[in-house]
Amino acid sequence: MKCQNKSLTLIAAALTLALAGLSTAVQAQQAPAAAAEPVPDNQVTYNVAAVSDYRYRGISQTRLQPAVQGGVDYVNNPTGVYVGAWATNIKWIKDGGGDASYEFDLYAGKRGQITDTFAYDVGGLAYYYPSNKLSTSANTFELYAQVSAGPFSVKYSHSTSNLFGTPDSKNSGYLDGQFNYDVYDGYTLNLHAGHQNVKNNGALSYSDYKVGVTKDFGVFSLGVAAIKTNTDAYVGRNGKNLGKSGAVVTISKTF
């Protein structure tokens, strides 16, 4: 055979490299894993976002127009106790004859594990619309409880005040389920279905649905979602149905 010695030399070299690689792999497996960074007892994070339409429970809060949003969160990891604040621009108060252009939310609660599989999150959330000047104040307070298992979660929110300026609507409730699952290379499928019951105002009760995808690119996260409701009872000053089917694009960052 031609070049037999050369072939044997190449084979020997390849075997040497393979054995060296195997030795390195074995050593890597035997080496202790790097210790994960300890989670601090107290954490503060900030979030900012720009959305093509601020939809809350399927209803546009900005007449189907964009919004800029931001918030801050604090959590005590050993106990699971947390507090936070969040703000956004809105337009629906003016549609109702009021004068507020901003929404400020304050919330606090506690989360943790029920079992290795199930987690819980309970708390209260105050929606504040400064100087809203509606005949029934838009300011709203809700208590909420959530149970989750892996990508699934179910949450119930119960208003202890009138609901967003609707007269005689105390004790309204919102039940929703979510499924958020990493389907491929950091792309997360977002599914949601919910039902808003408006106490003593059945014509304003409705259901909403969402199908979306989010992707974290590191510098920012991008989300695209299709949103739908089964109501035309919520109408903006421009006569548009604020619950109409539509797409929402979100660019956000948490740091």
Image (tube, grey):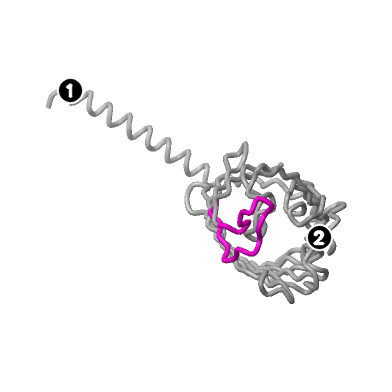
Q: Which residues are magenta?
A: 225-244
Instruction: Judge whether residue 221 is colored magenta.
Output: no
Instruction: Judge whether residue 242 is colored magenta.
Output: yes
Residue hosting label 2: 138
Q: CA distance from mark 1 to mark 2?
A: 88 Å
Task: Report x, y in % for residue 145.
Answer: 73, 69
Residue in the picture at 86% in, 56% down: 133
Sequence-first disc among 1 and 2: 1
Quadrant containing the N terminus in the rendered view: top left
Q: With respect to residue 147, does 56 lie above or below?
A: above
The answer to whether one can see residue 73 in this image is: no
Residue contact at pointers 1 and 2, CB within 8 angstroms: no
Residue in the picture at 85% in, 62% down: 135
Task: Report x, y in % for residue 194.
Answer: 61, 67
Q: Which mark is residue 194?
A: none
Q: Is residue 199 left or right of residue 181?
A: right
Residue 15, picture quadrant: top left
Q: With respect to residue 240, does 2 lie above or below?
A: above
Q: Amino acid at mark 1?
A: Cys
Q: Is residue 161 left or right of residue 26?
A: right
Label 2 sits on a secondary structure element that is loop
Q: Is residue 63 left or right of residue 192?
A: right
Q: Which mark is residue 3?
A: 1
Q: Is residue 251 left or right of residue 139?
A: left
Nearest the eye: 4 or 97:
97
Residue 181, picture quadrant: bottom right
Nearest the eye: 86 or 170:
170
Q: Amino acid at mark 2?
A: Ala
